[in-house]
Image (cartoon, rainbow, N blue to C red):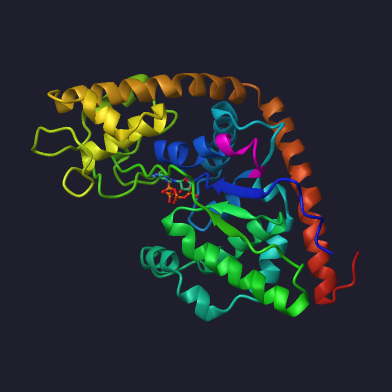
Amino acid sequence: MATPAPSKKVILSGIQPTNRLQLGNYLGAIKNWVKLQKDFDCHYMAVDLHAITARQDPQELRNNTYTAIALYIASGVDLEHCSLFVQSHVPQHSQLAWLLNCYGYMGELSRMTQYKDKSSKAGANIPVGLFTYPLLMAADILLYDTHLVPVGDDQKQHLELTRDVAQRLNGLYGDDTFVVPEPYIAPVAARIMDLLNPTTKMSKSAVNENGSLFLTDSPADIEKKFKRAETDSGKEIRFDEENKPGVSNLLSIQSAITGESIAAIEARYVNKMYGHLKVETAEIVKQELAPIQKRTQELLGDKAELERILKTGAEKATAKAEVTLRRLHERIGFILR
Ligand code: AQP
């Protein structure tokens, strides 16, 4: 039997520890995680198994994973209210992914636009993991009887696939085999764009690092990156994503941090110049990140404590994941150990 309905709905989310986390990861994901943790039963991860679908330097992957976890905690992810863990510490993710590999179809995986996009850039040898990645994501979600998954546009198709696979297994083995998850659309969803190329989204692995504002950037780097941010040849400071993507991005960043409406921010910049907007946005970002950076460094300075936190998180997640996995093993017809 599926576990009884919890009093709070379950949410699951994760970020790949590929490279350093950037402002979009914080404003589009982590800051919302913190808001959700009191009202939902939240599971937050550093998804290292997903990260290796592209080659990673081992030492960098390890450092990035520690730093990601420290940044989550420093940003306000509260261990009392949610479960926080590294994906590879809970082996049930890989185990369920294999089972789902036997129920997902080549045709539906071939239609995934992210696969088409990433495989076209992977050269002659495309890792199989890039193709089956959506089934690992499905495993992440289904293991915890997740009701809601915060998703950006690029992950909507993968969530749809998760729903299809869950419904397929429920059809075969009983309706209570898996909870069929729904997308969670945040009331205010920040989409932060690259500072140098504001028509593409800010990303950890941008070709030019000056377009991405990393959460661990120094105050001087933050100032420098905003000073160089691409704007347009006009003068007016107003939100217009089509004609003024750079200016609109800076307004969005301010709004996502302060909670002030875009209209109110625009009103403050009447008759001011782009230089003012850049300097003040840098200042707001510096102030937001300063305490987070300080706490992150403290946490990274005490690896033993960080590892204790990760052990507790993995144990909590494993206990839940194992129940779901055994339920499926039993229904498939495996002899339970
Ligand atoms: N620019 C962004 N604006 C708003 N939200 C963003 N997210 C990422 N970039 C932005 C949100 O961060 C979460 C986790 O992202 P991910 O690391 O799993 O994958 P991603 O979206 O592919 O992030 P990157 O930085 O672009 O990674 P790389 O360069 O490694 O591919 C998601 O909730 C995402 O919406």
Residue 293 drawn above or below residue 123: above
Where in the figure is residue 60, as x and y percent of width and height? 51, 40
Residue 1 drawn above or below residue 81: below
Q: Is residue 71 magenta?
A: no
Where in the figure is residue 212, as x and y percent of width and height? 34, 38
* 39 on left or right of 231: right
Residue 42 drawn above or below residue 220: below
- Quarter residue 183 falls in: bottom right
- Quarter residue 35 falls in: top right
Q: Along the line of sight, which residue is nearer the eye, 156 or 229?
A: 156
The answer to whether residue 304 of the structure is visible from this angle is: yes
* 53 on left or right of 3: left
Q: Along the line of sight, which residue is nearer the eye, 118 or 168?
A: 168
- Residue found at x 44% / y 67%: 115
Q: Along the line of sight, which residue is nearer the eye, 292 or 164?
A: 164
Q: Is residue 39 magenta?
A: yes
Residue 132 drawn above or below residue 214: below
Where in the figure is residue 142, as x and y percent of width and height? 68, 60
